[in-house]
Image (cartoon, grey):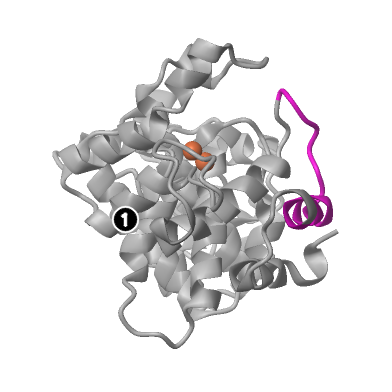
Amino acid sequence: MLLKLKPEQLRPGMYVILPSNWLHHPFLKNSFLLRNRQQIEKIMRSGFEEVMIDTSKGISMPLQESEQAALLKGGEASEENAPEESENASCEPESIVPEILNKAVASGLGAEEKARIIYWSSLEIMGKLFADPRAEKIAQAKKGIFQVVDAVFSEDMATHLIKLFRHDLCTYTHSVNVGMLSILLAKSFFKGQAGHNFGELGAGFFLHDIGKSRIDPGIINKPGLLTESEWEQMKAHPKAGYDLLLESGQLTEESRVIVMQHHERENGSGYPMGLKGSQIFPYARICRMADVFDALTSTRPYHKKRSAFEALNLMKKSMCFKDELFTKFVRLFGDGAN
Ligand SMILES: [Fe+2]
Ligand SMILES: [Fe+2]
């Protein structure tokens, strides 16, 4: 059972689950058994207002003094004895999917809290995958994405998810935003229709820019405008992603086509193939819509961050997004499009 607590309510013996990815706290893992006060003080200093505990893996109430003494036998554990280290001793390769995602999806948490865990877990999955996009990691990421898609389909959390979006320059943040928006749009657009494998589609949406892991990071992270030659290299990322996923054997052809076609445009001015209209796979059109929106609402070297309303307005008036798919897309934002 998952319980929410304030950090000062934590006690040694509780199994804590931190509400963020590893970039936002000083521990090696997001979830672990608390063995000493130093760990609790460190969590308090990290600035979290609330954390969760898993009572199936640790205590739910403060221990009696004698129990605490037994737990802490051998003295206050040093950092070397910290559980996040010892738990890594398993022979199993560690999954890039945080355990908290499995728990949250199966829990009775409210939609807002669940959305927060799902979003942060997705950032962690994609951050780790871009750092190490081997087939084994893609397979792990896919399992995590399937859970995310199941959760998104099982309840209404669009508003909560969209509010959580970060708008930085990280490719993995962009991948999560586009993955989330695309799956929400697919859910809305194909509602009630049979024949869509949304888990597989979700994998294609989240991994649409995985080809950037094969492009020179100096180009991907360049703070200014790209030269013509750099732009040519950048335009290779859809094909590079398709090839990477083909080699991995982890995604269906339908999902790989999303990756290949997500920069194609209705009028044929897109890349890499210059496809037009119905030549572009509908799933890839969904991904492109989300991709353009996320680019417009994030800070880029060549433009400032726009509000959702400004971005949707620009897409409609200057970028010819006008069809039924776009209408469904606008509806995702509801009152939040400002
Ligand atoms: Fe892309
Ligand atoms: Fe993208």
Q: Is 242 left or right of 319, judged from the image as shown?
A: left
User: Residue at image x 40%, y 56%?
Assistant: 279
Q: Is residue 102 visible?
A: no
Magenta part of the chain: 301-316
For the N terminus, the quadrant is bottom left
Residue under label 1, please give it.
Answer: 255
For the C terminus, the quadrant is bottom right
Q: Is 198 left or right of 124, judged from the image as shown?
A: left
Image position, residue 257 (x, y; %): 32, 51
Q: Residues within 10 Å of mark 1 (few under 14, many from 20)?
A: many
Counting the numbered discs, the total is 1
Residue 307 is one of the magenta-drawn residues: yes
Residue type for callout 1: Ser
Image position, residue 73 (x, y; %): 36, 39
Image position, residue 213 (x, y; %): 38, 27
Q: Of 152 and 34, which appears nearest the observer?
A: 152
Residue 279 is one of the magenta-drawn residues: no
Assign a secondary structure to mark 1.
Answer: helix
* Residue 139, above or below 148: above
* Residue 142, above or below 194: above
Q: Of 70 and 193, which appears nearest the observer?
A: 193
Q: Is 25 left or right of 183, judged from the image as shown?
A: right
User: Residue at image x 60%, y 15%?
Assistant: 226
* Residue 284, above or below 152: above
Residue found at the very far bottom of the displayed protein: 192
User: Residue at image x 36%, y 62%?
Assistant: 201
* Ligand 1 is within 8 Å of the C-beta of the residue at disc 1: no
Q: Is residue 173 visible?
A: yes
Q: Quadrant of residue 29?
A: top left
